[in-house]
Image: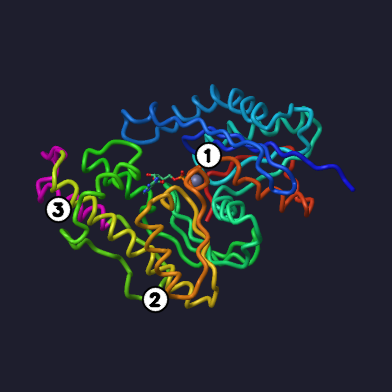
């Protein structure tokens, strides 16, 4: 029997510096995430240059911590994996350059992994069994898309967003409401005491069959409901029922749209399993709504625990599938900011 192979995986696509160690049997031995939230908060969003520089500072300590927690050393690593697409190009470059250096220095193969596909693979890790074929929904800060996933590596795009991603809408609405950054968790907390029916915000494409999304009109509707037409002179509302109602009504619109589009996609494709990944899938009302919809539709819902929903390097265990097929990256692997 061949000895087990240990993988070192790196994630630097946006504002989390992450490293993980896992085995070719998909056993995750460590997953370390250094968040840069504090660095970006005062700008109200991720500043690409600050993200790249923070990755440079954080990466080696994070890798070291991942090795310590996994109780192995660098010489035990038999393969290096890295998310090289999609994301902020300067941020991705830090991970890609480091991964190439590790692979070259250790004399082991390098594997390039797609960050969006990894968000779906996080469901495979969480389920601890095969989940393919399935319908995949990725809802993150940069993407909102539905995929037909016949295998972990074959994602066929069924439809995506025409403008903002769902997470981006959460972040922008948080800014409108003065809830700070990152927006998703802040809006969810605020919404907990609000009335989701206080405002009826638009739910784009909800009743037509196309598997597409649009969230920018929703964001603008929240802006006008908050400030009226004179948005330039406005200051965010303070704490109170008005702010909570706006947050709850906005969140309800996003949840309704995502849930309805998943239902339509399940029916259209005939798939009976839904795998959901990306930061927004940490949202509890969304999780509950998808759970209820899947129960009604007779479909299985696979959704990871919160630490596997947001960005991490453990989900890059998708690399194991490529490793089994000898799909290694070239020595001149590049970062590719755009995918889809
Ligand atoms: O997957 P992710 O960590 O990074 C990207 O690949 O973009 O997703 C980050 C996004 C952010 O927009 C954040 O506001 C959103 O996920 N998010 C949430 C929640 N937690 C994170 N959105 C709604 N509710 C949450 N609890
Ligand atoms: Zn992500």
Frontmost residue, 257 versus 154: 257
- Nearest the viewer among 309 and 224 is 309
* Mark 1 beta carbon near ligand 1 (under 8 Å): yes
Q: Position of residue 136 (x, y in %)?
A: 52, 62
Mark pair 1, 3: CA separation: 34 Å
Reading the chain from its start, which is encountered first: label 2 or label 3?
2
User: Looking at the magenta stretch, what is its main secondary structure?
Assistant: helix
- Considering only order in the chain, which callout, 2 or 1, is on the residue closer to the N terminus? 1
Residue 13 circle label: 1
| Residue 208 badge | none
Task: Mark 3: give few (<14), some (14-19) or many (20+) Cα within 10 Å.
Answer: some
The magenta stretch spans which residues?
217-238
Residue drawn 42% across the image and 49% down it: 282
Q: Is residue 222 magenta?
A: yes
Pointer 2 residue: 209
To which quarter of the image does residue 262 belong?
bottom left
Compared to 87, does 58 lie above or below?
above
Mark 1 burial class by Cα count in 10 Å: few <14, some 14-19, many 20+: many
Query: Residue 317, image x and y in percent?
Result: 65, 47
Which residue: 45% across, 69% down? 294
Mark 3 CB near ligand 1 (8 Å cut): no
Q: Which mark is residue 225?
A: 3
């Amino acid at each position: 029997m061949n000895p087990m192979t240990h993988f070192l995986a790196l994630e630097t696509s946006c504002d989390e510096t992450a490293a993980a160690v896992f085995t070719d049997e998909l056993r995750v031995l460590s997953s370390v995430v250094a968040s840069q939230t504090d660095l970006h908060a005062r700008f109200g969003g991720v500043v690409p240059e600050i993200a790249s520089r923070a990755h440079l500072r954080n990466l080696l300590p994070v890798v070291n911590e991942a090795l310590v927690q996994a109780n192995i050393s660098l010489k035990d690593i038999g393969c290096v994996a890295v998310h090289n697409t999609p994301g902020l190009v300067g941020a991705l470059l830090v991970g890609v350059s480091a991964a190439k250096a590790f692979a070259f220095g250790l004399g082991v193969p390098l594997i390039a992994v797609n960050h969006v596909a990894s968000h779906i693979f996080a469901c495979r890790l969480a389920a601890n069994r095969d989940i393919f074929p399935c319908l995949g929904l990725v809802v993150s800060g940069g993407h909102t898309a539905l995929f037909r996933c016949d295998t972990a590596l074959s994602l066929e795009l069924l439809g995506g967003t025409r403008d903002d991603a769902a997470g981006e809408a959460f972040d922008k609405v948080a800014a409108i409401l003065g809830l700070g950054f990152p927006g998703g968790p802040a809006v969810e907390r605020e919404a907990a005491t609000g009335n989701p029916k206080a405002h009826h915000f638009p739910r784009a494409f909800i009743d037509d069959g196309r598997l597409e999304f649009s969230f920018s009109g929703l964001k603008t509707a929240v802006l006008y409901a908050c400030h009226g037409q004179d948005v330039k002179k406005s200051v965010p509302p303070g704490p109170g029922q008005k702010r909570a109602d706006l947050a709850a009504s906005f969140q309800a619109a996003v949840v309704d749209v995502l849930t309805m589009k998943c239902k339509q996609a399940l029916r259209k494709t005939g798939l009976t399993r839904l795998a959901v990944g990306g930061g927004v899938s940490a949202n509890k009302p969304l999780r509950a709504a998808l759970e209820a919809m899947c129960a009604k539709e007779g479909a299985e819902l696979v959704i990871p625990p919160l630490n596997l929903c947001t960005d991490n390097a453990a989900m890059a265990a998708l690399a194991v599938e490529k490793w089994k097929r000898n799909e290694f990256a070239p020595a001149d692997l590049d970062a590719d900011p755009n995918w889809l």
